[in-house]
Structures are given as C-alpha cells and as structure tokens.
Amino acid sequence: RALPLLNPHPALPRRDVDRQVDAELVNLLFRHSRGLHASTALGSVLIAALFWQHVDHLVLVLWALYMLITGLTRSLVAHRFQREDIPAADAGAWLARFRSGNLLTGLGWSAAGILLFLPENQVAQLILTVIIFAAIAASLPSLSAHRSMFVEFALLAVTPLLLRHVWAGSANNLIAAALLLFLFPMLAAFALRSFRQMSDELRARFAYADLVHELSGEVAVRRHAENRLLELASYDQLTGLPNRSLLRDRLEMSVTRAKRHNRKVAVLFADLDRFKHVNDSLGHHAGDEVLRATAERLQAGVRRENTVARLSGDEFIITVEDFESVDELRSLARRLLMAISEPVALPDGSDVSLTASIGAALFPDHGRDVDTLLQNADIAMYRAKLAGRNGFVLFSPEMQAEALTRLSREKALRRALDNEEFWLSYQPQVDTRSRQVIGVEALLRWESREYGLVPPDEFIPLAEDTGLIRPLGAWAMQVAFEQAKRFEESFGAGFHVGVNLSARQFDEERLLEIITQNLERSGVNPATIMFEITESVAMTNAHSNLALLRRLRAMGFGLALDDFGTGHSSLAYLKRFPISCVKLDKSFIDNVAVNREDGAIARATIELARALELDVIAEGVETREQAEWLQEHDCFLMQGFLFSPPLRAHECPEQIGMGGAQNRPSANG
Ligand code: C2E
Ligand code: CA
Ligand code: CA
C-alpha cells in the first residue's frame, strides 16, 4: 500500500518529522473511525431491539441515546478533522479528542455489558457477545493504529462481560468466559500485528520523507553551488563582465560565424595605463571602482551583440563583429579611449582619471584561432603602450617578431644570473669644488652570450616585469656592498656607493632582511651606501615603504631620490621622504643652461634641497656649460660623461679633472 504523503512539501526541518508522524497517525485514526461509528450505531440499535423485552425501557433508551450522542459527536469531530487542514503542530490536540471519543464509546459499551446482561438467556448472551466483538473488530483499523487506544477500548468493553460470566459461575458461563478469554488474545494479537505493520510503514515513509527532505535540501544547496560555480566560471565577479573562459567560448562562436559568412572579427585588447599606480597609491577600492567604471563604459561604447570581457587585472577584451573598415575600428577605439579617460568618481568624493592603450587583431588577417588573435591583440596593445599610451595600434606581422625577441630575451635573462653574465660598473660622482670623487653609482651591466651588451634601460624593465629583478637586485646589492667595503678601505670614509633599488624590490618582504644580511656579510659602514630610489617607491604602498625607508635611514644608510624632475615629482616630496640626497634628472640638466623653465625648476630644487639640508647631485652632466651653470647655482655635486663614464671597479680614480671628459667606452653600456 502506497500511502500518500500528508505533507507534500518535503522541505521540512528534521525535528518536524516526528510531529509529522503524529499528525499522520491522527489522520489515519480519524479516517478509519468511520467503521467504528457505523458498527457502534448498528450494535446499539440491535441491542436495544434484542433486549427491549428484558430490560427496563427507560434504561435502554438512555443507553441507546448515550451511544447515539457519543457516536454523533465522534463523527462530527472526525468530519471537522477531515475538513480542516491539520497542521502537524496540532496533532496532539486532535489525538486527545480522538481518545476521549473512544473512552466515551468504550464506557457506553461496558455499561451495556453490565446493564443488559440481566437475561439468563444463553442465546441472547451469545448474540450480545458477538455484537460487542463485531463492534470492536469493526473499529480495528482505527484501534490498531494505536496500541494504547486498542487496550483502552477493548478492555473497557470486555472486562465487565468477563466478570459477569465468571460471577454467574454456571458451566455454560464458564465456557463462554473461556471462549472470550481465547478470543480476546486473538483479537489483541491481530490488532497488535496490524498496528506494528502500520507504524513500521509510517516510520519507513517518514524516514523516506526525511531522506527526501535531506536530499532536496542537499540538491538545492548543490544546485545553488553549481549555479554559483558556473557564474564564477563564466563571469567576472567585480565587473559582471564575461571572464576569460566565457570570452573564449563567445569568440570561438564569432570566429565560426565569421568563417561561414566570410566576414571579419576584430579583437580589441584594452589595458589601463599605470593602473597599478592607482591601486598602490589610492588603494584597492579605488582600483576596483576604476575597473567597474571602465567595464561600464566599454559596454556602453559597443553594440549589444559585441562581447566585452575582462581578461584579468586591468585587461579588457572587446570583440567587434559589425565593422566595415579598419577606419571604423579606429574611430570606435578612439571613442572607447575617450570614454575611459573620463574621471572616475571615488567613494571618498575625489576622482581619478586614467587612460588606456588598445591593441587590435583581426580575423582572419592576424590569426585564424582564438589564441592567436588574443595574443596578437596583446602584442599590438603592448605596442600602443610603447608608443606613449592612450592610443590604438592595429597588429602587424612585424610586431610578432619583436615580441618573439622579447620572449627569447626574457629566456636569456632568466639564464643570465646562473651564467654569470652580469657585472657592475661604477660611475664616479664628483665634487667640482675639490675635484674629489665623492662616490660612485653602481650600475648593472648584462653581457649576454646571445645579445652582447644589453643596455639596462632594456633589461631592467624586462627583469621588473618578470620578477627577476629580485634575485638580480639582491645579487647586485651583494656585489656593490662588497665593493663598497673595498672602496671604503682604499678611499676612506665619506666615499659613498650608490645602489639602485627598483620599486619591484620593495614588493618583497625580505628586502630589509637582504640588506641586513649584506651589511653584516660585507662589513661595510652603512653610511657608505646610498640607496637610490625613485619617487614611485615612496608613492606605492606609501605607508609600508615609507616605514622601511625611515628604518634604512635610521640604520645609517644614505637615501637618494633618483631621477628627480621626471614623472610626477614635486618639490613637496622632498619634505615628505626621509631622504638625504636628490639626484637631478639628466633630462633637466640637458637643457638647464638653455631652457628657462628647466633652469628655474633646477634652481628651485637646489635651493629647497639646501634649505632642507639635502645634497643635490646633478646627473648626466655632459658639457662644460651645464657644469658651470650648476656651479653658479650652488650645485657642486655632479655625475656624467663630462667627468667619467661608468667604469670597472679597479678603474675608479680618486680625483678627476674638471671637464676632462674621459669617455672611455670600455665599461659604459
Ligand atoms: P639611473 O639610475 O638614472 O642611472 C644613470 C644612468 O645615466 C646610467 O645609465 C648612466 O650610464 C647614465 N649616464 C650617466 N652619465 C651620463 C651622461 O653624461 N650622459 C648620458 N647620456 N647618460 C649618462 P645606465 O647605466 O644605462 O642605467 C640606466 C638605468 O638603469 C639607471 O638609470 C637605473 O635606473 C637602471 N639601473 C642600472 N643599474 C641598476 C641596478 O643595479 N638596479 C636597478 N634597480 N636599476 C639599475
Ligand atoms: Ca640611479
Ligand atoms: Ca637617475
């Protein structure tokens, strides 16, 4: 027998399952109590008819009336129960109602046993017994549902009958009593068996419901998780744009479509310019805001059929299918660049403007598969960056060769440290008043087996991009410290060695550890070392970097602000950073004597630096005029080809003649 689920909603909390079982039991009891009412009514009528002659009519009528009323009440209760949708929580109350109904009926029947058993008529007694048992049996389905209820009812009805027979003491009565005693356990066994069956069935069903519940819960959770995974797998969480994998799918479809219809597809690769700078200096929230705004603007800038996706970090891809010419693509890129460069409002009320560089590759011209298209668009984007950023570049095959060169250089650079292809050159710095060499700047040199002498301006950015700058920088520091110790010994204290630190080296938590280690190992006086940092070091991760710089100063190291005057440098930084020296950038010095503006800035810097008791070293001094101008404006510390190119360590002189340009090309990359 398949029982229908009382509660069709399987999403019940586990603790409610017990109450659910109760509710189901009450439901069964009431449903089957109809048989009890019918048999009770029929039995009452029969007894009244049979004993009309033998018993006082009034007693019989009262008894029948009582039976009728209880029967009626019970069917009314049952009716109400069946009409109402019984919440599981009410099961207890309904069970009590059912029990009291049973009790009243049972009492009525036992009264019959006592009141109506007056006749000595054996046949009448037998008939009465059969009727009582018939009534009990008829209500079995209901009684068997509940053990206690069966016992209550059956005992109430049967006990007086038994007592009556035993009391009468006749042989016939004893036989009747024995018969009852035999029938009663049979009835009980039968009832108990069906009760057990039913409760087992119920328990099984609720265990099943429980399982269903659990499963459905689990299924729901899993489905949720799957959806979420799918979402994560297809969409970027920050911008809501399709991510790399969804982009690939879509791009593949676009390419397939384009093949079929003999059309073109453009893949635009957009990368924000100097995004890392925003992230580092303004925080990740600002960075996120910029990315979100960029995503929105890109999406608004293209038609719906085109996909805008976020590849990673600050890289976005726009696929364009509906374009007629490269010119149209170009103007689209220009529009997108304009949209991106609009200021982005930040949560703190300020705003920030960023530009982007866009590269594009076309199907089928620049690649017939997704990977090649993305790669070539990337190469074109890189070209746009090189070309000065905030621009658009369409891929061309020559670029690929360049990119390959870059790639193989990267490989060569990775091997270079093991191959001992690096060395340091030292460029003297002069005090033009005394003509003394006051120090040198250590400059890294790479003599590649494959490429020959590679200029630092080429391999340092490569090393920074690949993270190789860390081991490389650590190596350079070690060599420079050891050499500095030797300089210290031969030139005495007061001589210093400039060591360049790239911003990427500051990303490393171990930087201080590396410095301390080298300091101990070389035994050099920290005052001999002058770290050269660019302002970007001080700008990025402002707090932690600043703390580290202060720490280095406290340890006794010199600190020079390199390339001062390029980028965003402002005089205000001079006060903010714990520096001891400013290096005026070559680009200033170049024009210092001819360009009024450059001259004015240089002069202001020199004055301010002096007010702040900072040394000023002019870099890249190549001509006498420059040197003279600088001296006139109270800047006497200089570095440049006018005095000396970078040299091998053993070539470094103690003194240098003014203007004696010793352009020995040997050591200068
Ligand atoms: P920088 O720190 O500004 O170094 C000065 C650069 O100017 C050196 O170029 C030097 O050779 C060059 N220079 C000096 N005097 C003159 C001059 O009169 N005229 C001209 N035209 N150039 C002059 P170099 O050695 O090619 O280094 C380029 C850059 O590479 C350096 O610029 C520095 O940023 C980086 N670099 C070099 N060595 C290291 C290093 O060990 N670690 C790190 N992180 N960066 C380094
Ligand atoms: Ca430098
Ligand atoms: Ca410099």
Image (cartoon, rainbow, N blue to C red):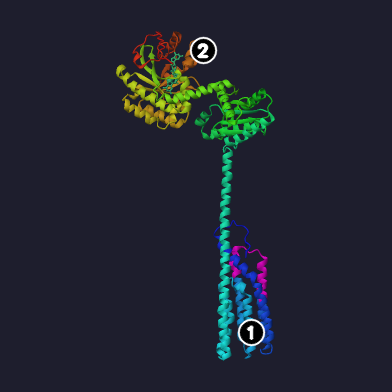
- Placement of 123 over or under 522, stated as above or below: below
Q: Is residue 268 visible?
A: yes
Q: Is residue 531 left or right of residue 465?
A: left
Q: Quadrant of ligand 2?
A: top left
Local SS, label 2: helix
- Placement of 631 over or under 475, stated as above or below: above
What mark, if any, has residue 128 been given in the picture?
1
Residue to which mark 2 is pinned: 596
Q: Residue 401, how many percent across, how many down?
A: 54, 21
| Boundaries of the magenta span | 71-95
Q: Residue 308, how many percent across, how many down?
A: 62, 33
Quarter of the rendering containing residue 515: top left
Residue plotted at (39% across, 8% down): 660
**Residue 93 within the magenta-colored segment of the rendering:** yes
Instruction: Between residue 400 and residue 98, name the one nearer to us.
Output: 400
Local SS, label 1: helix
Q: Residue 162, how many percent across, how many down?
A: 57, 85
Judge: label 1 CB < 8 Å from ligand 1: no
Report crowding for label 1: few under 14, some 14 to 19, many 20 or more residues within 10 A (C-alpha). many
What mark, if any, has residue 402 been given in the picture?
none
Residue plotted at (59% across, 44% down): 227
Whichever of labels 1 and 2 marks the residue nearer the N terminus, that label is 1
- Placement of 329 over or under 141, stated as above or below: above
Quarter of the image where the C terminus is located: top left
